[in-house]
Amino acid sequence: MSSPLNDRFPKVQFYNPALTEVQEDVEIGEGTRVGTFSLIHRGARIGKNCTIGSHCNICCCRIGDSVSIQTACHITRGTIIEENVFIGPGVVTLNDSLVPGRPLKAPTVRAGAKVGGGTVLMPGVTVGRQATLGSGAVVTKDVPEGATMVGNPARALVRHTSHEAA
């Protein structure tokens, strides 16, 4: 059965197009799947072969190819998510520092990063390539490439070798 969304995006799979909103001036790459009750705002650019879960709010942002954004995420205006990134359920990105007169500054998530469920990315932070953020982390500063960070505020996870732990 054809729907206006299927007509606009014939190479995108909408799980329930009647319960999904995609505003004007949105680009979605072929092979991408979009869950039910998601809203994709005007100006969003989503790459090929992505997964956008149900109940997501995707603002005017840039999402690379092969990105997986799980259920109930809020991706704020201006956020950049590069290719091959995993975003767990319930992740929130923020772009407003709440300081009067400061411009909006959204987060950037570099290629190959993994962001655990329930994580909050504060305005302007950059998550480095191949970095991993534990579930529930609150990221208040940049995450170095390849680092693993956990907690609130997020801090580097230090792994002890077996001889150090004794």
Image: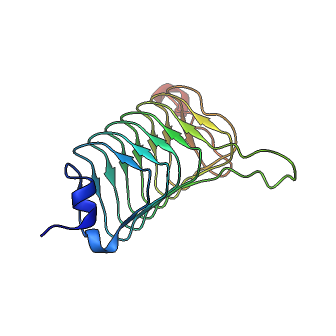
Front residue of this view, candidates 101 and 133: 101
Whole-percent x, y for residue 160 in the image: 52, 31
Front residue of this view, candidates 51 and 6: 6
Q: Residue at x 66, y 48 (%)?
A: 122
Whole-percent x, y for residue 9 in the image: 26, 53
- Residue 166 visible in the snapshot: no
Whole-percent x, y for residue 2 in the image: 16, 67
Front residue of this view, candidates 152 and 10: 10
User: In this picture, is 7 found above or below 163?
Assistant: below
Please tell me in which quadrant of the rendered image residue 54 appears. bottom left
Front residue of this view, candidates 3 and 88: 3
Whole-percent x, y for residue 16 in the image: 25, 70
The total of numbered circles placed on residues is: 0
Q: Residue at x 27, y 55 (%)?
A: 8
Q: Residue at x 54, y 28 (%)?
A: 164
Q: Residue furthest right?
A: 100
User: In this picture, is 82 found above or below 23?
Assistant: above
- Residue 103 visible in the snapshot: yes
**Colour scheme of this structure image?**
rainbow
Q: Residue furthest left?
A: 1
Which quadrant would the N terminus be assigned to in this image?
bottom left
